[in-house]
Amino acid sequence: MPDPIAVAETGTVCGRRFGSVTLQAPAALNALSLAMVDRLQAQLASWAADPTIVAVVLDGEGEKAFCAGGDLRDLYQSLRDCGNATNPYAREFFSREYRLDYLIHTYPKPIVCWGNGIVMGGGMGLMAGASHRVVTEGTRMAMPEIGIGLFPDVGGSWFLNRLPPRIGLFLALTGAPLNAADALFVGLADFLLPNASRAGVLQAMAQASWHDRALENARLLTHLLEAQAGPGTPVSAAALPSHLRQHFDEIQSLVGHDSLEDLAARLAGAAGGDSWIGKAAANFARGSPTSARLAYELLQRARHLSLREVFQMEFDVAVGCCAHHDFAEGIRALLIEKDRRPRWQPARLQEVDEALIADHFIARQPGDNPLADLG
């Protein structure tokens, strides 16, 4: 089988090197398989320990996507096989994916994540922790898990809570799509560059004089990317419409300060039509009611947790989703049979009781949480 990632090391004029790793599954929009996760984990760990590697570039093959999320087909089969019993594959999938995401968040060297095309779900998990997050004119970003009966995982309970007030909850509940200007506006990205400039960035990195200290290298990389995004760049945030900026006040009113039930009623009133807000609200109406309540609960519980604690909590809830109905049903409707008509159970938000939500948070694995050693 072909290698799921491509690895390269490039020499620089100062004798040091930087690493490049590219997801190689363009036909699947570079969706993350366990093989990809394991190869990325091993390669990043190796470079972290190599004093001659000064930085890392992470991107995806093809023009359509950096990474459209996790590869859910094997996971779906495990859900069918295991039902609500212990699911060893799910435990491995989520624990290893989250461990990789945590490594990127805490990486000791600068990482450039080139987020061109689709960046969703697991792709957001890879990108969120990178020190230098690049978006392009083709970036399409979202956390659409409510549509498959999951929740914004891969650290979403952490990074969505760190967006401007109420924006993270709105994105978690609606799966609203974002462009590059949106990502810059709320802090999900750091630089906007033309996708065609990627080769120029790599060339500039090769011609740079790097340092021995990671902090100085991070500053050098910032200046290098800022120079690539300077005057005369054919794309700019000002030239792209930011839906989040345009609808910021409306989102504040829709989300409000009260209960999920009140928020849901306001979103129901906004659903429909061709407007960005109307489509986002319609996504919420079509989504899993259990996912909506899980997303709401996770963002509340994660407000004062450490990053390590967030990943540990998300692991328990993700495995909990595998033991309940909606996750398998959402994957079936979207990816397997593709009828786009999921039959959620419960079907209404009012029917999702506290006991069902609490059952998602219990630890289903024997012994310690497999992410207990993070940090």
Image (cartoon, rainbow, N blue to C red):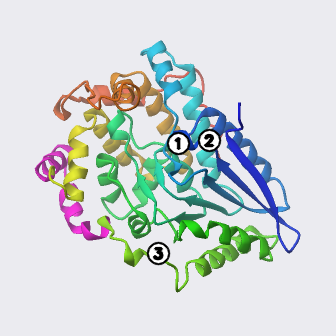
Q: Name above or below for residue 93 compared with residue 29.
A: above
Residues under numbered marks 2 and 1 in contact, where contact means CB atoms less than 8 Å apart:
yes
Q: Residue 49: percent from the left, percent from the top?
A: 81, 53
Distance, label 2 to label 1, CA atoms, is 8 Å
Q: Which is more N-terminal, label 3 or label 2? A: 2
- Answer with left or right where residue 200 lies relative to residue 353: right
Q: Which residues are magenta?
A: 244-270
Distance, label 3 to label 1, CA atoms, is 35 Å
> Is any part of residue 67 visible from this angle?
yes
Q: Name above or below for residue 133 compared with residue 153.
A: below
Q: Which is more N-terminal, label 1 or label 2? A: 2
Q: Which residue is under mark 1? A: 311
Distance, label 2 to label 3, CA atoms, is 35 Å
Label number found at residue 235: 3
> Is any part of residue 371 visible from this angle?
no
Q: How many numbered discs, if any?
A: 3
- Tell me the mark number nearer the camera, choosing from 2 and 1: 2
Badge 3 marks a residue whose secondary structure is loop
Q: Which residue is under mark 2? A: 99
Q: Residue 133: percent from the left, percent from the top?
A: 55, 63
